[in-house]
Amino acid sequence: ARYQFYCSNIARTFLIDPPKAVTSTYETLLSAQEACLKAMKPGNPFKAVYHAAADQFTKEGRDDLVKRMPKNVGFSIGLDFRDPSLILNAKSTVTIREGMVFNLAIGLNKIELSDAAKANCNTKSAVKDISTYALIVSDMAVVTENGGEIMTKHAKKPSDISYTVNDDESVVSSGSDEDEDGDAALARKIAKSADNVIPGQRQSKRLAKNAEAMQDIVEGAAERERKQIDLMARRNEERLRELARANSRNKGGDKESEKAEELDTYARTKDYSDSILPNQVKVDMANKCVMLPIC
């Protein structure tokens, strides 16, 4: 993504029917990210960030994960998405400076998933068919005097990114109601609502929450479309009134000038403003219009 020409990036791994071993590894990955942030202090070399992640895996007794790390744990980001000379790898001696911005991306590849780890999974779950998996969590981080600070404030706790689809008892987590955070409690409340349950069919609590969120998105899009139609109708009415006033002042004009026309902001694409960029919203005050990207 870009904002005022500056790049940004975020990545999350979503876990579907995750065994306890996968969730545990993901929690270790989050711990490694925290270690990297602490190592992002002004004066430290880039390689200190990479080794902080590796040392955290070793500290938690997961030496096997060190071998699954990529060649780097992120890079400097700004006007360019990736600066090839400023990479957070195991050898870089470039000095970290306050104010630097990084895309801190901690990933693990080809992690083995044993049959014992999959033993408690539902027989219908696709997890039964895999033998390896990968994880990644990526955030924007800025260097402060006390270390790295996350800029992309998006949920990444296991309870936020885990979904149980093939659980016979439709349980999202094994914890008690008292241990649930706000999101989990809301999901449980929605799942218990009779309006959200199809008779004779079980429904995942987190899926129920997502269904309501999707409904809000659809309703919001419909409301925006209705407002756009109303706005266009008002603009056309204003145009008709303007033509009527012009005709009343100039009754001797030709018949063509008396015809009302639909709004026509740009006759051709060459008339677009030079400042319009892909995937950006542009407000053209001169022509009284808004340019929106279509995805």
Image: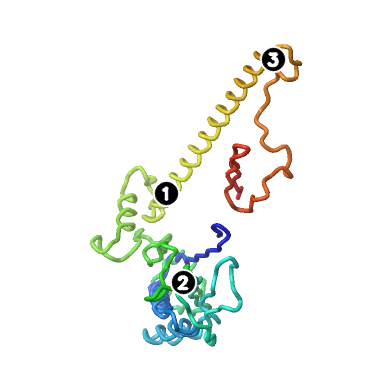
One can see residue 76 in this view:
yes
Task: Give 176 or 32, whichever is nearer the viewer.
Answer: 32
> Element type at marker 2?
loop
Please give the residue where the numbered disc 1 appears in the rendered image. Answer: 213
Q: Find the distance from the CA under tag 2 to the CA under tag 1.
A: 37 Å
Instruction: Give above or below for 93 relative to 282.
Output: below
Q: Please tell me the numbered disc located at residue 120.
A: none
Seen in the image, is 102 located left or right of residue 163? right
- Numbered disc in front, either 2 or 1: 2
Residue at the extreme left: 178
Q: Could you tell me the amino acid type at mark 2?
A: Gly
Please give the residue where the numbered disc 3 appears in the rendered image. Answer: 250
Q: Measuring from the top left, give residue 24's x and y in whole percent.
A: 38, 75
Task: Give 117 or 56, whichever is nearer the viewer.
Answer: 56
Q: Could you tell me the amino acid type at mark 3?
A: Asn
Instruction: Give above or below for 174 relative to 285.
Output: below
Please give the residue where the numbered disc 2 appears in the rendered image. Answer: 99
Instruction: Choose the circle earlier in sequence order: 3 or 1.
Output: 1
Q: Find the distance from the CA under tag 3 to the CA under tag 1.
A: 56 Å
